[in-house]
Image (cartoon, grey):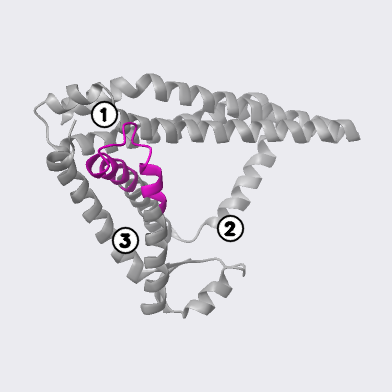
Amino acid sequence: MTKLLKYELKESSKYFLYIILGIIIASLSLAFTIIRATKINENNMSEFSAISMGLSSLLVFGLFIAVFVGFIFMVISSFRKDLYTDSAYLKFSLPINGSQLLNAKILNVFIWSVLMAIVTVIVNLLIYGIFLNEYITDIVMALKEAWSYFNVGLGSNIFLILHYIYSFFASLIAVYFCITFTKAFFKNSRNGYIWVLVYIIWGIIESLISMVTSIAIPYYLSIGKSLSISKLDYISLANSVFEPTNYINLNLGFFIIEIIITVLLYMFTVHMLNKKVDI
C-alpha cells in the first residue's frame, strides 16, 4: 500500500498545489481588503467606498468558497476516475485489494488536507506579519478573545480535535461508499453521477437515525470546561439550540451508532471493490 500511496500523492500533487495557490491568493486578497477597509475607515468612509468595500469582501469570500469547492471536487474526482475512466484498468490490474485502494485514497486526502492547513496558517502569519504589522496587536487581542470564548478546557479540546478527525474520515468513507455503490449496482450509469442522489438519500436516512436515536436515548456528552454526561429530552435540546451556551451537546447513542455505521460502510465499500465492481 505504501507504493500505491506514494503514487496517489504524486498523481494528485499538481491538483492540490493549485488549491494551495488558491489559498495563498485568497489570503492575500483578504489581507489587502482589511488594509483598504482600515484606511477608508480612518479617512471617513464615503457611500461609494462602502459599496466597493462590500463588493471586495464578497469577492474574497467567493475566492475562499471556490477553493473549498475545488478541494471537494478533487477529493471526489480522484476516487471516481479510478472507477469510471481508463485509469481504472491500470489500478485494478495491480496486485492490490479493495482495502489497500480505499486506504490509499483516504490517507492521500488526509495528508494533503493537513499540508493545506499548515500552509494556510503559515501563509496568513507571514501576510499579517508583513502587510498588517501595525495592526498585529489588535489582531492578536481579537484572537485571544475568540480563543477564550471557544476554549472549553484541555480534555474537551482534545476530544473535539479527535472528533473532527473522525468526522473527516467518516465523511470521506460515506462519499466513497456512495460512489462505489453506484458503480456496483447501477452498471448502466456510464458517468456514475447517480452517486449524488445516493449520497442525498443516505444523508436523509442518517438524519432520521439521528433524530430517532436522540428521542430514544436522551443521554448527551456535554463538552464544556469539563466532560460530563447529562439527560436531555428532545424538546429541551431543540430549544437550547437558540440559546447561547459555553458547551456542546453530543448524543451518546447516535455517536456510538455513527461509529458502527462508519465501520460497516468501510467494510461494505471494501467488499464492493473486491467483489462487485466490474471495470
Amino acid type, label 2:
Tyr
Within 10 angstroms of label 1, few (less than 14), some, or many (20 or more) residues?
some
Q: Is residue 44 visible?
A: no
Amino acid type, label 3:
Glu
* Residue on which disc 2 sits: 149
Secondary structure of the residue carrying tag 1 is helix
Can residue 190 be found in the magenta stretch? yes
- The quadrant the C terminus occupies is top left
The CA distance from mark 2 to mark 1 is 44 Å
Question: Residue at (18%, 23%) from the top-left corner?
Answer: 89
Eyeballing the image, is 147 above or below 243? above
The CA distance from mark 1 to mark 3 is 27 Å
Secondary structure of the residue carrying tag 3 is helix
| Mark in the foreground, 2 or 1 | 1
**Nearer-N-terminus badge (2/3):** 2
Residue found farthest to the front: 188
* Residue on which disc 1 sits: 82
The region drawn magenta spans 174-200
Residue 219 place in picture, x, y as percent: 38, 76
Eyeballing the image, is 264 above or below 210? above
Can residue 249 be found in the magenta stretch? no
- The quadrant the N terminus occupies is top left
Please tell me which residue lies in front, 206 or 117: 206
Question: Residue at (55%, 31%) from the top-left corner?
Answer: 66
Amino acid type, label 1:
Asp
Within 10 angstroms of label 3, few (less than 14), some, or many (20 or more) residues?
some
Q: Is residue 279 visible?
A: yes
Q: Main secondary structure of the magenta part?
A: helix
Q: Quadrant of residue 8?
A: top left
* Residue on which disc 3 sits: 258
| Mark in the foreground, 2 or 3 | 3
**Nearer-N-terminus badge (1/3):** 1
